[in-house]
Amino acid sequence: MDLSLFEIIASSFLALLGGALRIVWTRIDTLGRRGSDLETRVAVLADQKKNIFHRLERIEEKLDRLLSK
């Protein structure tokens, strides 16, 4: 089984290219997951912020009622 130099170089290049593509796709997938996690965290923080402002408004209303007496 004689392989020419071109075949050896071509198969090595294709193997390296396949490995590089696998690394790229893995990193893209990882970044996609991180993006999902960040979106979830931002949504939770936005909800918490909304709850905090609602509580502050209620406290402010109670203080206004107490001061008006």
Image: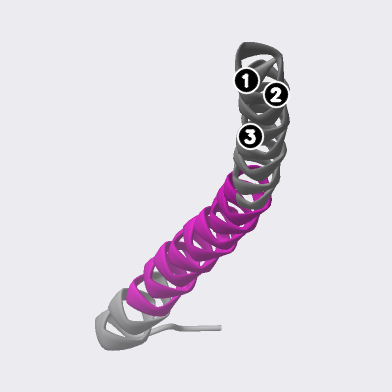
Looking at the image, residue 62 lies above or below residue 7: above
How far, Cα to Cα, is label 3 from label 2? 12 Å
* Local SS, label 1: helix
Q: Residue at the location (54% across, 56% down)? A: 35
Direction from residue 23 to residue 9 in the image, left or right: left
How far, Cα to Cα, is label 1 from label 3? 16 Å
- Front position among marks 1 and 2: 1
Direction from residue 38 to residue 7 in the image, left or right: left
Q: Which residue is mark 1?
A: 68
- Front position among marks 3 and 2: 2
Q: Residue at the location (72% across, 31% down)? A: 58
Between residue 31 and residue 38, name the one nearer to us: 38
12 magenta-colored: no
* Local SS, label 3: helix
User: Colour scheme used in the picture?
Assistant: one colour
Q: Which residue is mark 3?
A: 57
Q: Which residue is mark 2?
A: 65
Q: Amino acid at mark 1?
A: Ser
Decide: few, some or many residues near mark 2? Use Cα within 10 Å; few <14, some 14-19, many ≥20. Answer: few
Earlier residue among tags 3 and 2: 3
Magenta extent: 13-42
* Local SS, label 2: helix
Image location of residue 64, percent across then percent down? 61, 23
The image quadrant of residue 44 is top right
The image quadrant of residue 54 is top right
Q: How many marks?
A: 3
Pointer 1 with pointer 3, Cβ within 8 A: no
Pointer 1 with pointer 2, Cβ within 8 A: yes
